[in-house]
Every structure is written in C-alpha cells, then in structure tokens.
Amino acid sequence: MPTLEELRQTRIQKLERLKNNGINSYPTKIRRDFEIKKILDKFWFWRITKKVFYLTGRIKNQRVHGKAAFFDLEDASGKIQCFMSPADLSSKKSYDEFIASCDIGDFVEVKGSVFKTKKGEKTLRIFEIRIIVKSLLPLPEKWHGLQDVEERYRKRYLDLLMNSEVKAKFLKRSAVIKELRNFFDERGFVEFETPMLQIIPGGATARPFETHLNALNLDLYLRIAPELYLKRLLVAGFEKVYEIGRNFRNEGMDAHHNPEFTMLEAYIAYKSSDYLKKFIEICFKQLVERVNDGNLAVEYQNNKIDFNGQWKEKKYDDLIKEFGDFDLAKKNLIQPTFVNNFPADILPLSKTLEKNYSQADAFQVFAGGLELVKAFTEQNDPLEQRRRFENQEQLREGGEEEAQRLDEDFLEALEYGMPPAAGFGLGIDRFTMLLTNSHSAREIILFPTMRPK
C-alpha cells in the first residue's frame, strides 16, 4: 500500500502533466449556473426541457468501467451522480486525459443535462468537464480513514468533509445562535459588542489570559466575561442589552470546559431573578422546538430530557446535604432544574435575598447534568459592590488567583446610578452539547484548543 507521501507525489505528477498540456488546474473564473440541490428538487423540469447547465463541486466515489465513468459530484447543497463517456465529450482524447488526471477529492466544473439510469437514479450526463482545483492529498477514506478522535479535532475540515453527522452538529450550533438572536431581538433587546481586551478582567471568578499592548506599553487581559461593560450600558440608559461572544479563561480543560468558549449574556432593567426564571423557560422551549424539528424533548447521553414538563426547583444546601458535593449533585440534575439559594459570598456581583443576607438572589439552570445558565438580580449599590470587591481582593492577596478584582471605573459608573436589573449568562457550547447529544464540548467547538502534536 503506497504511503501518503507517495500518493501526494503521484498527484503532483498529474498536476505537472496538466500544466505541460496548457491546463490551469486552479483557474480564476468559474461558471456555475445552479447549486446541485436546485437541480435535484426540480429534476423533472430539467429532464423534460433537456436544459444544459454548468455545475461545480468535489468528486466523490469515482467508478470507471471501460468506456464509461461514473462519479458523485458534491457541493454544499447536495450530491448528484455524473455519467461521462467519450461519445458525449468532444473527443475520446478528452475522456482519456481526464481519467488519467482526475482523482477523488478534485473540484471540477461540468456542463451537461440530466437523465435517469435504468435503476432510476438521477444522473447528470456530462458534455464538458475541467478540473478547477487539483487536490494533492487524498481524502481520508482513501488512506487511513479518520477514526482517531484527536486527529478529527486537529483536522476538523476533514472531519466535516467526511462525516455528515459532524456537519449536522455544527449546522445545529449555527441555528441555535441564530434563534437566540431572533428571540432577543423580537423582545426589544439590543445586541452590543464589548471589549475583549480589558485592563481589569471582571464579571466572573476565573483566571484570565494575560497579554501586552506594545503601542501603549500596557498589560491587558482577554476578557473572562462581558458583564461589567454590559452593566455600564444599563447606566448609559439602555434597558435591554445582550451580547453573544467569546470568553477566555486560563483554567483546566475537560469535557465541559475549553479555554475559549461562547456565551450569551443578557441584562434587563427593572426586573429581578424571579422574572428571569419564566423568561429563560420560555426562551429554552422556543429555542429547542425550533432547532429540534418541533420537539421539546431531546435525547442526551441515554436520557430523555423534556423541556416542556414542569421544571424542578432545588436548593443549593439541600443538594449538598444529599450528595455531599455540588459537582456530584450537578451530574444528577438530568431534567431541567432551577438551583436556588447559593451562598452570597461566592457571587459577589449578585444582590442577596431580602429575607436572608447570607444567600444570593440567584439561580442556576441545569439539564442533562450540565450547568447551562447562571442568573441573578444584579448588585447596583455602589458601596456594597465596593465592599464585595474589597473582600475579593483580600482573597486574591491570600493566594486565590481566580478571585475578582476591584474595578474603580465600574464602581464610578455605579455611583451615577444603575437601574435595578436582572441578568444571566447562557453557555452556548454546553447548550449545543445537549441539543446534539455530544459527550464533550470539543465535539461542538469547530477548532478546540489542542496540545501540539
């Protein structure tokens, strides 16, 4: 069996032969009349009218039978079988040259019309064909395959090309983000973009990535959350704001954590955490239904999770008593569940319950054992927020690198007055894991962070 490099050299030789024959295998101008899906959807029309048109795509599954050749032509919209013979081309030489030069994985431009084979398969009869991209490496199915998980992540472009189920997951991820935007836009929220490079990383308890801006000789941090900037927009007079974007945290990696990840954060003035519970429940139900073919139940890791049922309510302390450890408790929260009554000292940006100052006016949403949402009534008392930040600074001085930092500019903004508000963050990566039945976040992050090979 030839090595990968030997196969590559063979293709380079074919490329050189094409060049010597005056054929540019990477032309600038391409003709394409339709996507393949449009041909298949109205096949009867194209067949009756015998219309001739141009298609483009990648060659898959080439089969040569003497004086005839079949191959599948694939573009992003679909796939169609193609038939080619010397009798239909301008000359037998054209047929022989193409067969000698073309490989599976090459991109071609074809001119032809459609017919049905004796077996009833929709087929394109080719009258003209030319290579528009000569591939130098064979697709995985022609050599080792693409079965190693680490290799799939490193070469995601091949993973997407060869595995339709992987492609479907990322199309669903895109649909999730689109539907989230629709949901918030329909309700009068305004989407903003806040800084990813920050002088003081705030809005979450996490260790940041550090960098340096040479132009200003300034140390900066990749943001760990957009929260404090979105709250500044509440001070500025906006009442419904949200952002979908990347956050970066220099922490551990596992099935549920990647150093860079996608979050939605939203804030709404004059509301509290109680309002957010209903808001989030409505959001989830609409989103799941629209991206899950009308179904409100999803299969995740051998569990059926029903978003249409009655969401459960649990208290943090009760879960600790039952399981002894919150990480263990989370794994057992399979159906959609609100977890309430968190200790106030672990959520320094949240208000406390009016009847119990030791507990935060906050909740988290879990489903499938995954933490999906963190939400709370936002702290808007500037003096209390300063006290909370000072406590966090003491923790930092004691060695807790993840403790939050005192942000004087944010505190000054609060002193101008921030309206009462509620806010939450939704982890899009984990939510997509749930909706695609993926066991790891790396399955639904296009190019996850990997150790160099």
Image (cartoon, grey):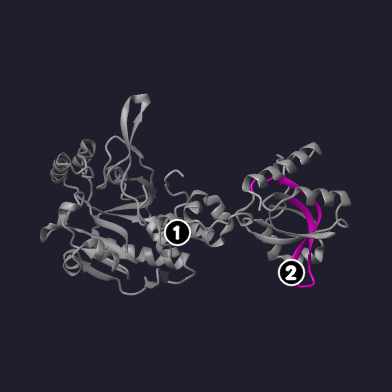
Left or right: 210 with respect to 435? left
Mark positioned earlier in the residue sequence (2 or 1): 2
Disc 2 marks which residue?
A: 121
Label 1 neighbourhood size at 10 Å, few (<14), some (14-19), many (20+)? many
- Residue 176: give its label: 1
Q: Secondary structure at mark 2?
A: loop
Check if residue 111 falls in the magenta segment: yes
Task: Tell me if label 2 and label 1 are in contact, CB under 8 Å.
Answer: no
Instruction: Residue 176 in the image: state x and y as whole percent.
Output: 45, 59
Please provide the residue range marked out in magenta.
Answer: 109-137
Vertical placement of residue 118 versus 40, above or below: below
* Extreme residue toward the front, this view: 1
Instruction: Residue 38 in the image: state x and y as whole percent.
Output: 68, 60
Check if residue 348 falls in the magenta segment: no
The answer to which image quadrant residue 271 occupies is bottom left
Q: Amino acid at mark 2?
A: Glu
Q: Secondary structure at mark 1?
A: helix
